[in-house]
Amino acid sequence: MAFGIKQTRWLYISLSILSLCLAFTITPVKASPSVITPVLSSSLATNGLEQGRNLYQSGRFAEAVTAWQTASQQYHTQGDRLNEALSLSYLSLAQQELNQWQAAQESIEQSLKLLQTNKPSGDAILWAQALNTQANLQLHIGKPETALESWQQAEKFYEQAGDKMGSLGSQINQAQALQSLGFYRRSKQQLEVLTQKLQGMPDNEIKVSGLRSLASALQMIGDGNTQQLLEQSLAIANKIAAKPQLSSILISLGQTAVDLQDPEAALDYFEQAQLLATNPSDQLQARLAQFKLFLDYDKPELATPLAPQLLQQLRELPPSHTSLYAAINFVGTVTLNRQSNPVQILPLKDLAQLMAVTVKSAHQIQDAQAEAYALHQWGKLYRRTQQISQAQELAEKSLNIARKLQANDIIAQSAWQVGQLYKQQGDRSKAITTYTEAVNALKALRGDLVAINPDVQFSFRSSVEPVYRELVDLLLENQPSQAELMQARELIEALQIAELDNFFREACLDRTQQIDQVDPTATVIYPIILPDRLTIILSKAGQPLRSYVTHKSQAEIEQTLDNFLVALNPVSDSQDRDRFSQQIYDWLIRPAEGDKAFIDTKTLVFVLDGRLRNIPIAALYDGKQYLIEKYAVALSPGLQLMATRSLHQNHLSAIVGGISQSRAGFSALPAVESEVKQISKAVSSSVLLNQQFTSQALAERVKSSSASIVHLATHGQFSSRLEDTFLLTWDGQMNVKELSELLKNRGSDPSKAIELLVLSACDTAAGDDRAVLGLAGLAVKSGARSTIATLWPVKDQAAALLMTRFYDQLRQPKITKAEALRQAQISLIRQTDFHDPFFWSGFVLIGNWT
């Protein structure tokens, strides 16, 4: 089947951040009957126990249930309480596979009760088995915290019994529970340690589950080679005929293929998973994955025949944590498709009926989280049909449940939904209150829940960013008060930080300092692009906030910004460039200048929004002069800056690295040699050029040197995707995480932190309208106080000249980094042939400008 070349919108997009993770089928290590060595006696019951074990291993769960029910009854008749307990524990496992949750609960409770009344020293392994089974059940009915505690208890009993493999299995399961709770990095750390142990062990089901669990954790975090781990897990599962695990592994491989934008491979994996599924739940997951794949690659003609079949299957499945979320995500997928595609996959009334049943079922099995999510999704359907009062009732029910659970992921989405409904009804005050609750919940998710696989790149833009922006829009309506301006400013800063967190999939901005403690002579400018206007907030230490509004549509503003970028090319018409540049100047700068807001201001610090990040602010033109000729210019994620100490101009020292030769498919940069030599004359330098400039050499030099500046003249790329942001060294590409860790390699001593990181030949990714996020991310994450980089590839002779003059200026007493860059740019404008903005305005300073 051909999918065509249209760009994917990412596959696993759901109603909230946390529900994204539920597309991943969590399969704990279930202490399979083939692993546990029970206390057996020679009897018919023993035959039943063995028969059930064989049936379970071949995926014949209903027959295994019958065999273990018979065995438990026979052991009961014989008075053999330990083997009766074991049979009931196994019985619960098989019942769980069949989604017989109530029966599974009764079986495991009866097993634990029998063990409680029979406590000889040799039954530790049986306790471990039963607790493992109980924890598996608890996880599936939406109680991961309780499951984690049960697996911790199971681990102790395995250790007591001397069963190392059982202990490892319990630890793997604890990592799975941590994932369900949103603690992905803790899970990853635990699994990496366990995987090292597993690699040297014999091939068995524990090893299969361990490898897959690590792959799942890495997939969530967007880190590591998940495909290799999954393929190893699949090979072992096939080798030992672990049929119940095959489908889950294949689904994970399919999801990895989706992340790699290989839909044909993904479909192949999903189809194999459906064929090899040994239970209804795995079969449903495989079919749902195919359905989502078809919709996300704009193949509704392939998805439409599947929809009624899936709907029927979802109606028929007994209630379970997995089946409830399958229904919720199915409806969310169809609803999302309707927003971008006129093709009706299913009538809205059928989707609403499914959500009504899901809410009832969730309440029945006491899965409060699923109930809250289903109410939220059901409310969205009513809002689509303009049944506002019903939508509001359902959304508020969802929000109330979420508050009781203290579930910030659900609060964020439901409070947003309630806020939208209040806004739609014209109740601004209540809308602001509930929007604020949603934003506070999103802030609380900072940390473990920012890290959920590459889909979150899209989800952030559809489920997180709009919450902030819509609240800012509400706050800045009409004539905002000082309190509303302050809240709007804080929201824009919080959004910037949330974007950086999302980029790195971890919270990344920690040590901060307020601007008036850094430079009271700077003015911070927040241009905020809203759907129908551009609002500018001005912040200066010790003064009230000011705001200015230009009534233009977002589309018109963004088109002008795009036109300006195109016109910056030296071959373009300079009159067009000046016209677009002056238009943007009139929006961002002129109203405040007319208001005399910049008196005593030396540096303008821009907290840029959206497409504005891509344009060179220094090149804005007032009709006579460029902005850089009037003020020093810096960029920042907000008032909260990394703490700094001033550079000692007389004692500057640098690590200077670069590649001048053609390497790894990248063109030569012949002027780099000259740039490196000139910088070495201006500043005491340790040089790594061409073959010397390896990642290892750079790491060692950074660690051993006390240099305050790291200057790297080499190819690189900034992107909104973490994976596509890198720097070229002689021995390959160094991704942004590796580079940031390398630069932070001097430990926690603030006095040894890098003051200035300069990247003088990097580029923003073509066609990526958020590519500068990668630059900002590196600037913040590297720990460097300030970063200078280029928004596009600059002619290397111009770059060498500008950087040489920058360092000459930096040596002058009492000059800030922003002023040194300004003077270097002015010298190119006024004293060289590189006066065109293309040659000098792409250099930007991010972070601390003093």
Image: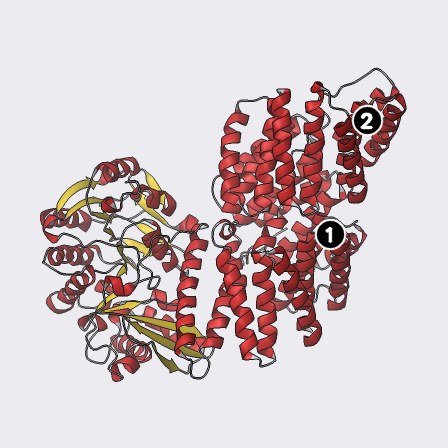
Asked which quadrant contains residue 658, the reply is top left
**Which residue is more in the foreground, 160 or 519?**
160
Q: Amino acid at mark 1?
A: Gln
Q: Earlier in the sequence, mark 2 or mark 1?
A: 2
**Which residue is more in the foreground, 343 or 129?**
129
Asked which quadrant contains residue 151, the reply is top right
Asked which quadrant contains residue 592, the reply is bottom left
Q: Viewed as shown, does residue 10 lie left or right of 697? A: right
Q: Amino acid at mark 2?
A: Glu
Can I make out residue 11 in this image?
A: no
Coordinates of residue 91 in the picture (x, y in percent): 79, 33
Q: Where 735 falls versus 477 (above or below)?
A: above
Q: Which of the labelled discs sits on residue 672, or is there none?
A: none
Can I make out residue 627 in this image?
A: yes
Q: Where 797 falls versus 49 (above or below)?
A: below
Helix, strand or loop at label 2? It is helix
The number of callouts visible is 2
Coordinates of residue 231 in the picture (x, y in percent): 57, 34
**Which residue is more in the foreground, 165 or 108?**
108
Q: Where 725 falls versus 702 (above or below)?
A: below
Q: Are marks 2 and 1 in contact (CB under 8 Å)?
A: no
Q: Which of the labelled discs sits on residue 366, or is there none?
A: 1
Coordinates of residue 525 in the picture (x, y in percent): 32, 71
Residue at 63% x, 55% y: name it.
405
Residue at 50% x, 72% y: name it.
470
Q: Residues within 10 Å of mark 1 (few under 14, many from 20)?
A: some
- The residues bearing labels 2 and 1 have C-alpha atoms spaced at a distance of 29 Å
Name the residue tied to disc 2.
84
Helix, strand or loop at label 1? It is loop
Which residue occupies the extreme top position in the image? Answer: 42
**Quadrant in the picture for the C terminus:** bottom left
Coordinates of residue 370 in the picture (x, y in percent): 68, 55
